[in-house]
């Protein structure tokens, strides 16, 4: 699309959203569940195109943000005690734990390697053999099938020095918790996760909570279209689940990826920053794959990590506060010296506000 | 506001805020005796007949060979460009080599040939040098330091203090290629894009602009931290605002695609053959016409304006008509880009 066309389309969508929102005489609060949406919204400066009574709040879909601090500490303690190589997505490297961050651990001489895909961990394991390599498994249904594939590939290739420290999360349990909150009107649903799970799987939002949800892509126009559709459903009081990302998301999702995930992992209780303990919201290795489970093989106990009580990450990822409400934001907490994960993750709400000037 | 720093981390080498605080808090208080603190790309010195520009730069890029260039040609271009940005013609280069025990001679020869070719093309001579070898593991293959001297040919002062409200900002071509080319040539990436470094001497561009005298206010090459770092630097040094149009910033398709895949902002990716020029508003067409037939300025574009609002900040009008801040990059997640 040519720049002029893109701008014209955006203006038309913005006008439509203004018009629809004017028919709702109160504040409208829509949650963008996914951190990548948060970044796109801020990167495109979309808030300027929304009416004053429409408020987009960020949700729990940034994997790094919802991961408990104790996970970082556990990884560092394992690496120290057992002399393993840590393989991780870059986003986790600068998240602070009580033991410092992985970046600081690397500066002290710790072996921390950044990967772009879990499959890269296989190459690292081959290169480092026989030294154990521990991949830090954070993420949602988007990432988990690739980790499952990595584990299966490692077994097939007879690689016996690759392990995964898991803190995987699944999206439905927290979404149900949040949908129950009366002040949230609707959900901009995560496109990448929906590509795996399918758009149909969000039907409970309408059935159980009478709230609309629209699966959205990640370009500025994708988001404007999805927001228009959400506000339209609210204006007409006809909540539904719509799929506005059909070029990627099928109604039934990707059953092959789901089967892979289910073969290797089974649901377990999980601890969420901001949401607490949610039964069935995490994934652990099935018995058959226990030999990949870093937590079992490199026992260090669960670290008693303490969050800075002034950090508002917990309230921010549940949409009840914005970074502007946090006394640390932009002062003690910056991307260079982050206090909470929302400031360091490339999908974090605080990082988005800081980088693009939203606060 | 900032916690005391006790160890050097890779982020201190990224050219962003962390590098800035290392320079400001640790280096300048000890070494500055009056000239260093202004942090020019190269310093202009009097008292040698002609006015000269003098600079130094170290090169630790990994890998040492990447599409379109290598550490040898880069070590010449980088230093030539720092001199050129002071309005000076690069003339003489010193080259210090730090070699790791066990480094292949054939690779060294290839790097030196490439440096020699780059120097010949840029019209500079390597006139002095030094070679050290360190035990295996004490360096990574080869590090190069070059310093350079140029003769100032600018007839009007160039600097952030020359920048005025309504001045226009020009970038000499599509941005982000060097950073992406180096990142993609690293072993950890399993996908391939056809992206070559833009590493080149920018003196031919500067040479064409200098006759415009005081109509050219300020020049800088947007290396580490990319266009985003340079624009923020211009805003901060001039204490004025900058407004840029996202849709007018030239970025090659392949660079955009690779950047999106890696989650990197192409505006934060390094360039090694580009220049950002701040010029008087009335001279924009003239400047663009001077660049039109110059191959290394292909794709040059006017990207923004100096404003009296938002002092020290860069505000970007997005493609869809929104606005946001174009932030200064923080530390560097992908170090050793030059």
Image: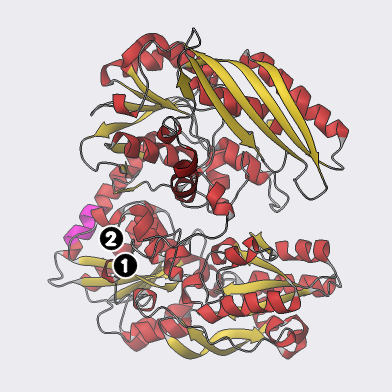
Residue ID at (47%, 62%): A246
Distance Cα–Cα, label 1 vs label 2: 7 Å
Residue ID at (74%, 28%): B130
Mark 2: which secondary structure? Answer: loop
Label 2 marks a residue whose chain is A
Q: Position of residue B219 (x, y in %)?
A: 42, 25
Q: Closer to the camera, A336 or B248?
A: A336
| In the image: residue A89, left or right of residue B37 | right
Mark 1: which secondary structure? Answer: helix
Residue B18 at least partly seen: yes
Residue A257 at least partly seen: no
Q: Position of residue A233 (x, y in %)?
A: 27, 71
Q: Closer to the camera, A353 or A43?
A: A353
- Give the mark nearest the N terminus, 1 or 2: 1
Neighbor class of circle 2 (other Cα within 10 Å; few <14, some 14-19, many 20+) is some
Magenta highlight range: A14-19
Residue B22 vertical position relative to residue A304 in the rendered view, above or below = above
Quadrant that contains the N terminus of chain A: top left
Which secondary structure class fits the magenta region best? helix
Q: Closer to the camera, B330 or B314?
A: B330
Quadrant that contains the C terminus of chain A: bottom left
Residue beneath disc 1: A323
Residue A179 vertical position relative to residue A62 in the rendered view, above or below = below
* Residue at far left of view: A25
Residue B168 vertical position relative to residue A341 in the rendered view, above or below = above
Residue A359 numbered tag: 2
Q: Position of residue A320 (x, y in %)?
A: 29, 77
Q: Position of residue A291 (x, y in %)?
A: 78, 84
Neighbor class of circle 1 (other Cα within 10 Å; few <14, some 14-19, many 20+) is many
């Amino acid at each position: 699309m040519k720049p002029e066309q893109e701008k014209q389309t955006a203006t038309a969508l913005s006008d439509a959203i203004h018009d629809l929102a004017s028919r709702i005489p109160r504040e409208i609060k829509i949650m963008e569940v996914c951190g990548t949406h948060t970044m796109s919204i801020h990167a495109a400066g979309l808030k300027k195109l929304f009416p004053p009574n429409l408020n987009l709040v960020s949700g729990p879909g940034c994997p790094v943000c919802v991961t408990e601090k104790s996970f970082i500490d556990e990884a560092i303690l394992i690496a120290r005690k057992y002399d393993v190589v840590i393989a991780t997505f870059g986003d986790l490297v600068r998240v602070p734990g009580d033991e410092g961050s992985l970046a600081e651990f690397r500066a002290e001489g710790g072996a921390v390697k950044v990967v772009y895909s879990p499959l890269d961990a296989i190459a690292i394991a081959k290169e480092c053999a026989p030294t154990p390599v521990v991949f830090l498994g954070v993420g949602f249904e988007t990432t988990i099938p690739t980790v499952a594939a990595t584990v299966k590939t490692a077994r097939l290739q007879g690689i016996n020095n690759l392990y995964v420290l898991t803190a995987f999360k699944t999206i439905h349990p927290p979404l149900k918790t949040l949908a129950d909150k009366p002040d949230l009107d609707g959900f901009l649903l995560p496109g990448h996760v929906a590509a795996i799970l399918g758009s149909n799987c969000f039907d409970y939002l309408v059935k159980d909570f009478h709230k609309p949800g629209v699966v959205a892509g990640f370009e500025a126009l994708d988001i404007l279209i999805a927001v228009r559709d959400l506000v339209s459903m609210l204006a007409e009081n006809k909540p539904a689940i719509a799929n506005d990302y059909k070029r990627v998301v099928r109604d039934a999702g990707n059953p092959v990826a789901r089967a892979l995930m289910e073969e290797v992992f089974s649901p377990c209780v999980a601890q969420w920053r901001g949401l607490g303990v949610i039964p069935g919201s995490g994934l652990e290795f099935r018995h058959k794959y226990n030999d990949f489970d870093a937590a079992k093989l490199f026992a260090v106990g669960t670290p008693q990590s303490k969050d800075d009580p002034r950090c508002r990450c917990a309230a921010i990822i549940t949409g009840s506060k914005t970074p502007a409400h946090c006394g640390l934001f932009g002062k003690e907490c910056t991307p260079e010296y982050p206090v909470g994960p929302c400031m360091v993750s490339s999908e974090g709400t605080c990082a988005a506000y800081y980088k693009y000037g939203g606060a | 506001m900032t916690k005391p720093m006790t160890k050097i981390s890779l982020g201190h080498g990224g050219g962003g805020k962390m590098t800035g605080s290392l320079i400001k808090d640790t280096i300048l208080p000890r070494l500055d005796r009056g000239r260093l603190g202004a942090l020019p790309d190269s310093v202009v010195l009097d008292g040698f007949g002609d006015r000269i520009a003098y600079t130094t730069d170290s090169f630790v890029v990994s890998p040492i060979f990447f599409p379109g260039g290598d550490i040898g040609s880069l070590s010449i271009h980088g230093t030539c460009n720092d001199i050129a940005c002071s309005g000076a013609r690069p003339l003489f280069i010193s080259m210090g080599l730090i070699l790791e025990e066990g480094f292949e001679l054939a690779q060294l020869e290839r790097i030196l040939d490439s440096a020699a070719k780059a120097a010949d093309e840029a019209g500079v001579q390597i006139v002095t040098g030094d070679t050290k070898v360190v035990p295996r593991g004490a360096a990574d293959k080869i590090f190069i330091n070059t310093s350079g001297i140029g003769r100032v040919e600018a007839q009007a002062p160039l600097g952030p203090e020359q920048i005025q409200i309504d001045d226009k900002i020009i970038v000499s071509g599509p941005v982000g290629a060097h950073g992406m080319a180096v990142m993609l040539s690293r072993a950890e990436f399993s996908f391939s894009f056809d992206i070559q470094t833009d590493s080149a001497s920018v003196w031919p561009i500067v040479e064409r602009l200098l006759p415009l005298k005081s109509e050219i206010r300020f020049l800088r090459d947007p290396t580490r931290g990319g266009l985003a770092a340079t624009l923020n630097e211009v805003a901060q040094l001039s204490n004025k605002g900058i407004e840029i149009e996202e849709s007018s910033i030239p970025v090659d398709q392949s660079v955009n695609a690779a950047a999106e895949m890696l989650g990197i902002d192409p505006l934060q990716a390094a360039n090694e053959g580009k220049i950002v020029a701040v010029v008087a508003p009335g001279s924009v067409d003239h400047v663009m016409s001077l660049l039109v037939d110059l191959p290394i300025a292909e794709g040059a574009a006017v990207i923004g304006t100096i404003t009296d609002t938002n002092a020290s900040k860069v505000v970007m009008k997005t493609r869809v008509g929104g606005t946001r801040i174009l932030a200064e990059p923080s530390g560097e997640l992908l170090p050793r880009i030059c």
